[in-house]
Image (cartoon, grey):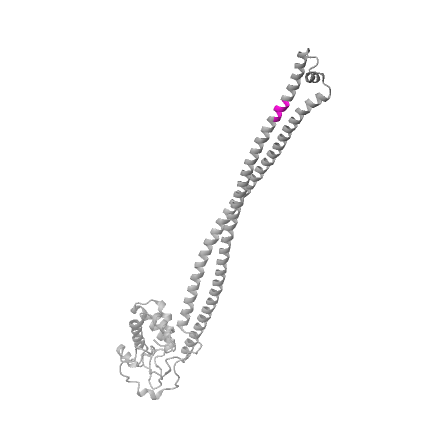
Amino acid sequence: MRSGLRSGSAVALVAALVAIVVGFGPATARADDPTWAQVQAAKHDVHKKAAAVAAIEQTLNGLETEAARLGTIALQKAALAAAADAKLQAAQQVYDDLEQQTKAAAGKADTARRTAATVATQLYRGGDPGLTVWLSGNASGSLLYRLGALSQIGDTSSSLLEQARVDQRQAAALGDQAKAQAAVRNMLAKQAESAANDAKAAQAAEDRQVAQTKSQRATLLAQLAALQAKSSALQASYAAAQRAKAAAAAAGATSGGTGLAGIAAGPGSLSPAAAQSYAASRLGAYGWGSGQMSCLISLWNIESGWRWNAYNASSGAYGIPQSLPGSKMATAGGDWTTSSETQIDWGLGYIQARYSTPCGAYAFETSHVPYWY
């Protein structure tokens, strides 16, 4: 105990100072020992980085969900593109068929025209008597015969020419259908290409975002691991320093210093173990549970090693709670110089008034180098 115990007159101990046995002061912290503040700062850094990682994990989960959704859409659009392509192929086939039919119809019409002309020519060149008579006007008395011959030639030619006209009209109609089908084909081709391009673009954009977020997560995770390692190392070093100080306190090398040989033990002078037992029995009187005892043991191990005559030559603090000056403990009993119980009662009252609990006092103690409370 250092601060907060300096008021009051220093009495009863002055004469005893000449009887100091071995003068050793408070255990000194090494320069490289981490402070409590450093340990807490490292924990805070880990907490902040872990929160950042958790946030980006949540973002990534959302992006991956969106990527999966867009992937499904891409599949659906690819299926639509495939269907559109199938329609396109069917339209192309219809167009090709119509083109062939148009060419065939045009060919038939042309053939019909040529056939009609050929019939008349062949009849004439072949010396057909009906045609010759009709053309020459000879045997004009046979008018009935000439009319019959002319009718035969006319019927054949007319039939051929009519077929030529029908074929020509069919060819024109088929050509119009082919043009319309070509327009449908071109429209379907554009739709299929647009659907496929949209799906690919959306998927590529989402994939890039997911990749970028994964890269950020990897960086944050590496930083978090480094901070966790640093925090763990600091906590381990801090804990080791505390164990060393506690061991030194138990061995007598504590901030409570040595005992005063000139002060004779009294009826209330207890061993460290007995003093701890008494303190444990008094926790309930201050409203504390048994869980506070471990903090109290650690606290007064550092201060005095639980020795009733522990004296710090550097500061003048005395007793189990290291009251400064020791005479403050007279408010708890006139036997404060030798009674462990009186010192403990005073020390517990001081802790309650200043820190509420032993654990609160111990936390404050270990947040300073050198330690004090």
Measured from the top left, where is residue 312 in percent x and y? Answer: 36, 82
Q: Residue at x 47, y 54 (%)?
A: 63
Residue at the top extreme of this rendering? 141
Q: Which region is colored magenta?
A: 159-164
- Rendering coords of residue 301 (x, y %): 38, 76
Question: Principal SS element in the magenta part?
Answer: helix
For this view, does 227 lie left or right of residue 163?
left
Residue 161 on the magenta segment: yes
- Residue 339 percent location from the top left of the image: 31, 79
Vertical side of 107 occupied by 205: above or below = below
- Residue lying furthest front: 137
Residue visible at 64% across and 29% down in the picture:
110
Task: Give the mark count.
Answer: 0
- Residue 138, quarter of picture: top right
Q: Against 290, is 317 above or below?
A: below
Q: Residue furthest right?
A: 126
Say which of 213 and 242 sits in front: 213
* Quarter where residue 247 is shown: bottom left
Quadrant, the C terminus: bottom left
* Side of 89 relative to 348 (left or right): right
Q: Is residue 196 left or right of residue 297?
A: right
238 part of magenta stretch: no
Left or right placement of residue 75 versus residue 1 in this view: right
Residue 265 figure quarter: bottom left
Q: Residue at x 41, y 75 (%)?
A: 246
Percent across and percent down for residue 86 are 56, 40
Residue in front for this viewpoint, 327 or 266: 327
Quadrant housing the N terminus? bottom left
Q: Looking at this view, is 266 or 318 the one in front?
A: 318
Q: Which residue ends up furthest to the bottom in the rendered image?
A: 18
